[in-house]
């Protein structure tokens, strides 16, 4: 349940899920160079150059296709609750930064935990629904994030995930390839 105690009606949520998944799958049709460089970007609705991105940009741009600006939402929450985010501990920051905060997996995980539904982490593929957000810990202690699609592998039965691990956005059967660190569902109530 959302932190404010409300969740969208099922009809709105279902429509949003379809739109989010379609937007995420559309990302896989684009040529994107993996680039996690720091960029100065506009605020709100800022974005890095369209031909570059990382795993978080798949999530950010997919939600943006629904009119949801994670840059603004994360920033506003960090302004009010900076101590709840890992920015000081992990990156040594003393204040929010609209250019990068929403592009960090650990910050998105905190935001989704606070303002969406935090769901069980499981190795049961049936517990992962289209539109769910999943975070992983990759080798080398690297956080990663992706969106569960509405397509299942004919071989494993696992839901395919849209993510960018370095070769551009891909739709792949990788849900259980790495340690899952978070499982979320997020659709703002005023969407």
Image: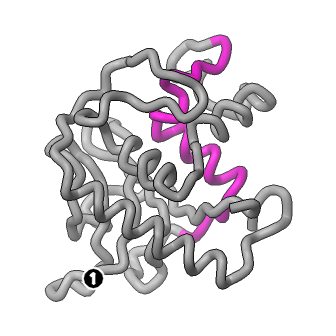
Residue 176 image position (x, y, % from top left): 30, 67
Describe residue 62's horizontal placement relative to residue 6 as left or right. left
Residue nearest the observer in this picture, 94 or 42: 42
The color scheme shown is: one colour
Describe residue 48's horizontal placement relative to residue 41 as left or right. left
Residue nearest the observer in this picture, 11 or 118: 11
Which quadrant holds the C terminus? bottom right
Q: What's the residue at 51%, 38% (across, down)?
A: 106
Give the vertical position of 184 relative to 78 (above or below). below
Residue nearest the observer in this picture, 161 or 127: 161
Give the vertical position of 65 relative to 5 (above or below). above
Can you tell which quarter of the image residue 7 is in? bottom right
Can you tell which quarter of the image residue 86 is in? top right
Residue 82 image position (x, y, % from top left): 72, 26
Which element carries disc 1, helix, strand or loop?
A: strand
Residue nearest the observer in this picture, 148 or 174: 148
Q: What's the residue at 51%, 18% (across, down)?
A: 91
Q: Which residues are magenta?
A: 94-120
Give the vertical position of 62 relative to 154 (above or below). above
Hey, which residue is sitting farthest right in the picture?
A: 5
Give the vertical position of 5 relative to 138 (above or below). below
Can you tell which quarter of the image residue 184 is in? bottom right
User: Is residue 119 in the magenta section?
Assistant: yes
Q: Pointer 1: residues within 10 angstroms few (<14), some, or many (20+)?
A: some
Describe residue 17's horizontal placement relative to residue 189 as left or right. left
Q: What's the residue at 68%, 83% (across, down)?
A: 10
Residue 25 image position (x, y, % from top left): 30, 64
Q: Which residue is mark 1?
A: 152
User: Is residue 15 in the magenta section?
Assistant: no
């Amino acid at each position: 349940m959302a932190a404010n105690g409300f969740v969208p009606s099922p009809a709105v949520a279902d429509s949003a899920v379809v739109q989010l998944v379609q937007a995420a799958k559309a990302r896989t049709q684009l040529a994107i160079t993996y680039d996690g460089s720091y960029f100065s970007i506009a605020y709100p609705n800022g974005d890095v150059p369209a031909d570059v991105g990382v795993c978080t940009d798949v999530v950010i741009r997919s939600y943006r296709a629904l009119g949801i600006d994670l840059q603004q939402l994360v920033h506003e929450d960090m302004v009010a609750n900076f101590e709840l985010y890992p920015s000081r501990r992990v990156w040594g920051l003393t204040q929010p930064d609209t250019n990068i905060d929403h592009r960090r997996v650990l910050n998105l995980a905190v935001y989704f935990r606070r303002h969406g539904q935090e769901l069980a982490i499981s190795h049961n593929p049936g517990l992962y629904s289209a539109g769910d957000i999943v975070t992983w810990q990759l080798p080398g202690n690297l956080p990663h994030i992706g969106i569960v699609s509405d397509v299942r592998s004919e071989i494993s039965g696992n839901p395919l995930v849209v993510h960018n691990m370095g070769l551009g956005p891909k739709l792949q059967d990788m849900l259980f390839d790495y340690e899952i660190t978070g499982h979320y569902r997020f659709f703002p109530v005023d969407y």
